Amino acid sequence: MVTTINDLHADVLGCALRRLDGRSLAAASCATAGLRALAADPDTWRALCLAEWPSLGSCSRLLAALPPRQLFADAFPFPSTDAATAGAGELSLPGELVSAVDIYYRGTPVLSRVVETPASSPWFLGSPFRVEAVERKRPASPGATTTAAAAPSPEEMELRWVVVDPAGGRAVNVSSRRPVAVDRHWYTGETLVRYAVVLGGCKFEATVACAEGTGDVAEVSLAVEDADGAAVGGEGTLRLLAAAMEAPRKGGGEREREAEEAKRRYGEFVRRKKGRKESKARREALVDLCCSAASAVVVLTCLAAVALR
């Protein structure tokens, strides 16, 4: 007669654990030593990683370089927004970045890409950081967006973008998953769906451009911007990512709450950037006024000197 959960056969418990999501599986592993041993099964965590990020199926070396359980623990929670960058210079910077990009629509994966980015060349380190998962010159096929008859609603699109350092064996999530803003391009009419996280005072923003009318994915890109709105270079981005990978993760919460928190921080970042621009504009206006006043004084002094001669 079964009186406790430990009396169940290991195969039955293993089958039950494989039906849990990552957070529930991690919680179950804390219950008993037996469950902890069963929950450590690499195949179970591998299946969870592939379910969360289908793009990993096309890049087996990532799961070989990074144990699936650690990959899930690194990439599923949101990184700490207070990740210190002061000591990032002492960290080993990644020599290569691998991005696992997945777009979901109404819970169904509709586009998956893996982008490998060499990160050690002088050109990369000195140029503004930008990674394109779907390029405009090679857009996703029309059927890759959704099978719905009508154009998809941007608010129902979910983007999962994980950046992995294969050599260092670490990963970090750089997407808010749910949109933080939806805009329309002033010239092309494309819908721009924005996903962002704020790390070390800088904004990692992924943008999905959807064609007008059809909703087909025309471009998917990731860029980094500092508090003044300037693009962050490759070396600066590597330092931010290295610090974020080493920093603690936030405690897992409900996805809706996490999405709202990411949207709130994005709004705060945008307001701070706007305030800094307005303050800079006021300072420049004051400097211009002082220069104009000084020029007027010089001109009047010269005129007075000529008139009194």
Image: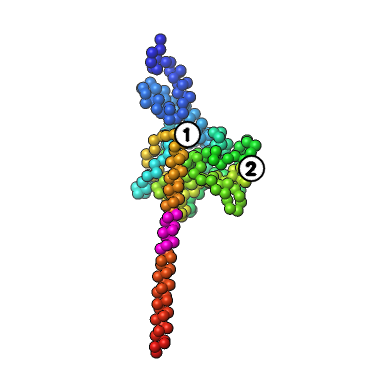
State whether residue 117 is above or below residue 67: below
Q: In which quarter of the image is residue 104?
A: top right
Q: In which quarter of the image is residue 283?
A: bottom left
Nearest to viewer (mark 1 / mark 2): 2
Query: Residue 77's spot in the image, x, y percent?
Result: 43, 36
Query: Residue 56's spot in the image, x, y percent?
Result: 51, 35
| Residue for point 40% across, 12% down | 2
Residue highlighted by disc 1: 63
The residue carrying pointer 2 sits among few (fewer than 14), some (14 to 19) or many (20 or more) residues within 10 Å by Cα, namely some
Count of numbered circles on the image? 2
| Residue for point 49% across, 44% down | 180
Three-letter code for the amino acid on which mark 2 is drawn: Thr
Query: Residue 18's spot in the image, x, y percent?
Result: 47, 24
Residue highlighted by disc 2: 214
Q: Is mark 2 on a helix, strand or loop?
A: loop
Q: Earlier in the sequence, mark 1 or mark 2?
A: 1
Give the magenta range: 274-283
Q: Is mark 1 on a helix, strand or loop?
A: helix
Three-letter code for the amino acid on which mark 1 is drawn: Leu
State whether residue 104 is above or below residue 290: above
Let me know if residue 106 is in the magenta part.
no
The residue carrying pointer 1 sits among few (fewer than 14), some (14 to 19) or many (20 or more) residues within 10 Å by Cα, namely some
